[in-house]
Image (cartoon, rainbow, N blue to C red):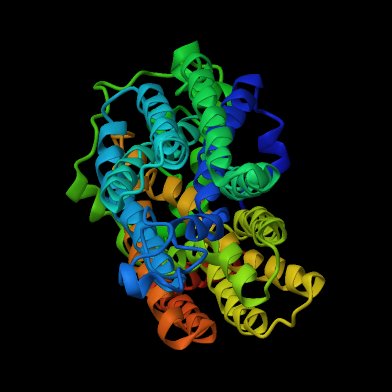
Amino acid sequence: MPPSCCASLSQYTHHHLVVFLLTFFSYVLLHASRKTFSNVKVSISAQWTPSILNDSSPAFSPGETWQDNRLFEDEKQATLFLGILDSIFLFSYAVGLYLSGVIGDRVNLRYVLCFGLCGSAAVEFVFGTLTEWLHIYNIYLYSSLWVLNGLLQSAVWPCVVAVMGNWFGKAGRGFVFGLWSACASVGNILGAFLASSVLKYGYEYAFLVTSVVQFAGGVVVFFGLLTSPKEVGLSLESETGLGPIETDTDSHKPLMSDEEDEVEVEKYSRRGQSAEQPVEAPAESPQAIGFLKAFCLPGVLPYSLAYACLKLVNYSFFFWLPFYLSNNYKWKEAQADRLSVWYDVGGIIGGTFQGLISDFMGKRAPVLVVSLTLAIGALVGYSRSPNDQVINGVLLAITGFFIGGPSNIISSAISADLGRQDALRGSKEALATVTGIVDGTGSIGAAAGQYLVSLIESKLGWMSVFYFFIVMTAGSIVFITPLLVRELRAMWTERRARQRQL
């Protein structure tokens, strides 16, 4: 049984709290600005299409309208382009994740993180606010800005996960990272409320508010974040009793190792006997791991593929839920924005609760498989939700619990586990690279999914979209199953070893 989460949490200091909050709110602000785009899609679609057709126009200027500065002839074309923009963003975001993960292991994480936050805020201001103020409507400009935005935003997640991995060790990681990974959902909620509060003045003001707040957050991070305990003369062992950062070789044992618990107990007992002795510095500074070597680490590929399927579903809710609620149930856009936050509330609770359970079990895969299996039933139930906001909100929270929860665990706690496993002994510079690989592969799946969602909806309707989500959720279970079998076999071996001792 892993150490008590409460016992490990009691040993953290104010440095850990500051790091937790700064990294948490860094991604909160990023997701709040990202959520703005999905929350104002209806307004953007209306702005990009003519609202009044000129009945006499065929006699004078066939195919033209009173508003000749609009991009598209009808709402369907605008919706399809919005889906293309989502895919453009996620593809560039995925490519950027592979690059920024490698860069993050070689450059000061604080610099990379601040550059991503402030640069993305500037691009979003130009995309959503400046173009509207100047009445510039151009699909090539929009596409170019969204490519740049994806590349800049990709610098943030690998950095914040790496910083958290530097400060928080194995004990209680599922709970700590499960709670911390709620940053994305909190950002979605904040973004929804910020956008809905100023939407009556125009969608450009929603972009203005969130981009300004994000830029200010980047400045605070630059001056306040400590990326490693070493910056204040601390080691992980002196702060948490989990051992120095350089020797955290067993951090991924519950996921990747079939060794018995006696080995871990013996190691911790040896640490306790020598607690008063000074920590020996490693002979050589750990070197950053190569991209291909990181990709071939145990568990990285199956979890990356599983996350590709799962992030497709999760980000489809993220990008399209307010639009779906507004169009399918004819609710006002502001009402749809506020109702959509219940999906994120479910994800927050799910990630924290499931992370805590995985800590007590010492295994992650069983928790993920059970949750994703129940997620299939939740998707079926939500697809048949009546036109009632209370029932819809409850079903949304349940769906978010079983989908958003596993998504948060894979992108945070499991990414940290993978970047601290036995195969990396002698090198700690892999967290950002591994995190970039997992999240980058997930973003590729999500990018392809956003165009498919808009295409399936336009051809077959929303019910077929939910069938698509069910298939993708089942696919994530398939990729996790080999890891589940390995962990169950390890649990059986440990149980038989204890029985022999008794």
Position of 393 relative to 125 (above/below): below
Q: In this view, does 55 lie to the left or right of 332?
A: left
Which quarter of the figure has residue 120? top left
Q: Is residue 480 visible?
A: yes
Residue 389 x, y percent position in the rendering: 78, 70
| Residue at 54% across, 23% down | 216
- Between 460 and 482, which is closer to the camera in this rendering? 460
- Between 340 and 336, which is closer to the camera in this rendering? 336
Residue 103 x, y percent position in the rendering: 26, 33
| Residue at 58% across, 34% down | 209
The quadrant of the picture occupied by the C terminus is bottom right
| Residue at 60% across, 58% down | 358
| Residue at 48% across, 25% down | 218
Position of 117 relative to 157 (above/below): above
Residue 482 x, y percent position in the rendering: 38, 74
Position of 356 relative to 114 (above/below): below
Q: Residue furthest right?
A: 390
Q: Can residue 494 be seen in this view?
A: no
Q: Is residue 131 left or right of residue 14?
A: left
- Between 354 and 463, which is closer to the camera in this rendering? 463
Residue 432 x, y percent position in the rendering: 35, 39
The quadrant of the picture occupied by the N terminus is bottom right
Total numbered labels placed on residues in the image? 0
Q: Is residue 389 left or right of residue 55?
A: right
Q: In this view, does 65 lie to the left or right of 296?
A: right
